Each structure stands twice: as structure tokens, then as C-alpha cells.
Image: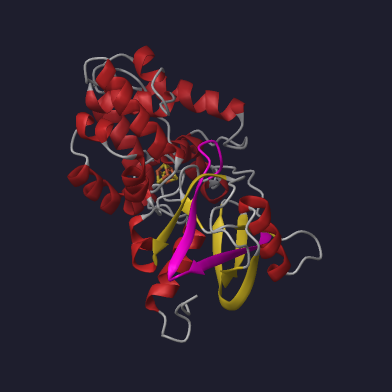
Amino acid sequence: MLQQTQMDRVIDYFKKWMRRFPDIPTLALARQDEVMKAWEGLGYYSRAGNIMKTAVVLMENGGKIPDNHTDLLRLPGIGPYTAGAIMSIAFNRDYPVVDGNVERVLARVFDVDIPVKTKQARNFFWEKAAKLLPTGRARDFNQAMMELGALVCLPKNPDCHLCPLQSQCRAIQFDTSSQRPVTGKSSTIIPIEMATGVLLKNNLVFIQKRQPDDVWANLWEFPGGRLKQDEKPEQALIREFFEETEFQVQLVKKITTVQHSYMQYRVILHCYFCRLVSDSDLPFLHAAQEYRWIAFSELDQFAFPAGHRKLIDFLLVTDKQTKPVPL
Ligand code: SF4
């Protein structure tokens, strides 16, 4: 959960997760939808798929997490960072861990002026972390470095007067801490306009499950997609519905416009209620692996991407004016 995600966002998810999936056998037997639902809102959903696959692989091999680096790297979703974290924190073996917090500390202590995400910088950080690691103290050392970055060597206004590395820190010496690490990040936010439709029939809502190799794999969604050039949201929605399901739909009314951010994108999502024009309510799926017609009250049982979840939350709290009309 902590891959690419800050601790304070993870804590509640972690506690709920551990109550629902307290051990490897429980996770290995869980249904995919249940796992995705537990992950809903945390982002980077491939992690949920990988941890589930890992549980299955582990159960096929004795049900234990391997205590060697090479075997850990063979498990789905486990790269050098997670393998190093498990080896050092769980087994106290001498493996370094370099996350964003550690990168920031090292970039400042050594006043690294190359962009932090380049291969050259990465190699430097991993080599330095390995060299600095005191033999037999990996568990303490790695956690201390991560905590130092998370609590003291903050991205903005680091608390240098509290820092045990102050006397060795070159960024302090050269007054460069505000310029380290060099992110090289593009600050360009790309706006995207999309349209989506809540299709109703006999008071049931149509939802579909995204493909396993897609972005937001295995999450549920309302059909829809990105507007083409010069296309209106209404036109895009009718086109997308047909392309994805072969349903011909008619828009009934606009529900709302949802905005959310995703990586470097800012998504504006136009949301509509729709009715079916096609005779059959049986779709031909072209962008999904599965579909359901469900009661409105059941929407909360499925995991949706952030934009669609915002739409559902809006529908659930909003007044009768915007609630679906029976179709
Ligand atoms: S002295 Fe300041 S900039 Fe240097 S590592 Fe410590 S907190 Fe970070």
C-alpha cells in the first residue's frame, strides 16, 4: 500500500484490510471484487491485483513469505523497493530501501543536483544507501531514514534544527535545501474532458467491469469515455455507449460535472442519466470483461475509479431532484 502512497492515506485502509484479510490463506481465497472494493480510492490498482496473485502463489509454495531477496523479486508486484523493505524490516537482513523520503534526505545530504528520477540519480541513491547501512542494523537504519524524510527533512521547510545529520548536510552548507531534490517534473497539468452515463432500466443501473489489462483494471464503471475534438459531451456519450456495449441510448438529463485529478491529468467528467433505445438489454461488450444490471442501492458494493465514485457519492447524497427517474 505504501508504494507511491503516503502513510497518512494508507493507515485506515491498512487497518480495514488487516481486519478483512488477516493472513495469506484468507487473501488467497478472497474474491477479486472484494479485494478491489477494499482497495477502492487508494489508486494504483495493479497493487491490489498483485498482492492477491502473490497470496495465491505463496499458498502454492507452503504459504510463507520467502526470506531471500531473489525469491521475493519473483513474486508479482515486488520490485527492489518492496523486496528490500521486507528483507530489512521483516528479517533484519542487510538490504537498503530507497523511497521518496530517503531520496530527499540523500539528495540534500550529498547535495545531488541531477534530477532525482534519472537512472544516474537512482543508482547513486541505492549505492549510497547500501554503503551507509550499518551491518546488522538494516531494520533500524532503513526505518530511521524513511522517518527522517517523512517527519524532519520535509519537502518544504525542513526542520533542520532537529536533524541529526545537520552537521554533515551539504545542502545546509551550500544553502540549497529548497532546490533539492531536483525533481525535473513537468508542472504541466493536462485537462481532459470525458462523459459518462448512468443507464437505467426498470430501476436497475448498468455497470461493466474493466478489462484485466486496462488502466483501472478490474474496477467497475459506467460506460463512457473521452471527448473527441469538437465533440459535445452528449455526442461523445452516445458514441462511447455504442462502441463499448452496442447499446443505443438516449440522454435523459445531466446529473452533474465531476472533477478529479489523475497523475498529470485533470479530468472533467460530464455525467448523465440515460435510457435504453435498443430493444435488448443484453450488451455486446467491447471494453469490459463483465456487466451487471444492479439496483441503485447495490452500487456501494462495487469498486469504481475515483471519478465514478464521486458521481455515486453525489447521487447518494443529493436531493430527489437529481435522483434517477424510474425508466
Ligand atoms: S539538515 Fe535539513 S536538509 Fe539536511 S538532511 Fe537534515 S533536515 Fe534535511
Residue, x 29% and y 28% (percent of image)? 55
Residue 190 in view in this figure: no
Would you identify the image quadrant in which residue 232 lies?
Answer: bottom right
Q: Is residue 220 left or right of residue 213?
A: left
Percent coordinates x, y for residue 167 in the rendering: 39, 38
Depicted 26 relative to depicted 184: above or below: above
Percent coordinates x, y for residue 14 in the rendering: 26, 46
Q: Is residue 5 left or right of residue 307?
A: left
Percent coordinates x, y for residue 224 in the rendering: 61, 59
Residue 191 among those drawn in magenta: yes
Residue, x 30% and y 13% (percent of image)? 68
Front one among 314 and 123: 314
Q: Could you tell me what secondary structure mostly forms the magenta stretch?
A: strand
For ligand 1, give the image quadrant. top left
Residue 300 in view in this figure: yes
Percent coordinates x, y for residue 297 in the rendering: 34, 67
Would you identify the image quadrant in which residue 118 lies?
Answer: top right
* Start-end of magenta stretch: 190-215
Depicted 197 relative to depicted 184: above or below: below
Q: Is residue 87 left or right of residue 74?
A: left
Q: Is residue 226 left or right of residue 174?
A: right
Specify the farthest residue to the right. Answer: 230
Residue, x 43% and y 39% (percent of image)? 105
Residue 261 among those drawn in magenta: no
Depicted 63 relative to depicted 142: above or below: above
Specify the farthest residue to the front. Answer: 279
